[in-house]
Image (spheres, grey):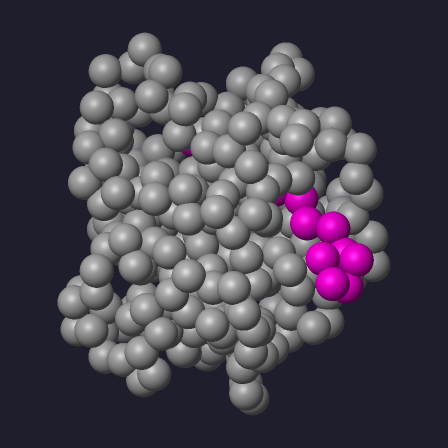
Amino acid sequence: MDKSKVYICKEITPESIVRIYEKLGVKLEGNVAVKLHSGEKGNQNYIRPEMVKNIVEHVNGTVVECNTAYEGARNTTEKHQKLMEEHGWTKYFNVDILDAEGNDKILEIPNGKVIKKNYVGKNIDNYDSMLVLSHFKGHPMGGYGGALKQLSIGIASGYGKNYIHCVGKENGTFEDMFKVEQEKFLEAMADSASSVVNYFKEKNAPIVYINVMCNMSVDCDCCSVAEDPCIKDIGILASLDPIAIDQACIDLVYNSNDPGKEHFIERVESKKGVHTIEAASELNFGSREYELINID
């Protein structure tokens, strides 16, 4: 099996995001969903609209998000739409809350390790291709957040996020999220990510993955009060393989000369974050083996 290609550009600018996208040689067409993180109210590390404006316009995309499973500024459509406006997303882009109203779309996962279905925002049916634009950083529950987390928790509806966190328990409570076995939660993320990849594959619709390695805190953009970044910026990565791009990002952190990496690595390892990549690889929708291609 050929190694997956992962491109890297050390310059982090709106222009370089477009440049690395074009290196992939895939043109996203039709109605293009751009999945990114809107940033929780109060968060200081999320990637701002101005950084991604060029690429969203380049693919003529619609910014898509889903509501959260926990209290905050994004757990209802009304509050989420208001925050999207406050954070400047609606100033530049068309924005679609995928699970805004109506029943969720259920994606079956017959070969899932721990869950056999995934609840996603039903409006995903309106899109012909997708750009998964991830801010690579740490995460208090998953260890790290990248392309696989965007595919899983990110595209899951509010209910679906709870379902993944509770490893398939219907109508689980917020407290239930913290009672599950950590490895099972990470495997549920891999399962749900695979269902989204397969959904677009069945539609013969491409997905492009871009991970931006900047403002890397041990905390997620979903935290209203996040730790400040602990490791210096590394660059922008792009691939057609969500597993390879996340593995490459993890490897770049481990191989960094920045002493701040130890704090980041402690977060990843304490939450067994790489197990998401391991589980995803076993589901065969990508590879941990990659070729890193510098385009600087």
Q: Position of residue 169 (x, y in %)?
A: 31, 78
Q: Residue at point 42% right, 61% down? A: 113
Q: Position of residue 235 (x, y in %)?
A: 50, 24
Q: Quadrant of the N terminus?
A: top right
Q: Residue at point 34% right, 44% down? A: 275
Classify residue 189 by image quadrant.
bottom left
Q: Is residue 147 above or below residue 15?
A: below
In the image, is residue 292 part of the stretch drawn in magenta? no
Question: In the drawing, does residue 62 fall left or right of residue 262?
Answer: right
Nearer-the-camera pick, 138 or 224: 138
Task: Tell me if I can see residue 33 in this picture.
Answer: no
Q: Position of residue 68 (x, y in %)?
A: 38, 69
Question: In the drawing, does residue 53 fall left or right of residue 233?
Answer: right
Classify residue 40 by image quadrant.
bottom left
In the image, is residue 203 part of the stretch drawn in magenta? yes
Report the residue that reaches farthest toward the bottom: 102
Nearer-the-camera pick, 209 or 17: 209
Q: Is residue 231 above or below residue 68?
A: above
Q: Is residue 155 above or below residue 16?
A: below
Q: Is residue 241 above or below residue 148?
A: above
Classify residue 277 by image quadrant.
top left
Q: Residue at point 77% right, 63% down? A: 203
The residue stretch that appears in magenta: 201-214
Q: Position of residue 25 (x, y in %)?
A: 80, 33
Q: Quadrant of the C terminus?
A: top right
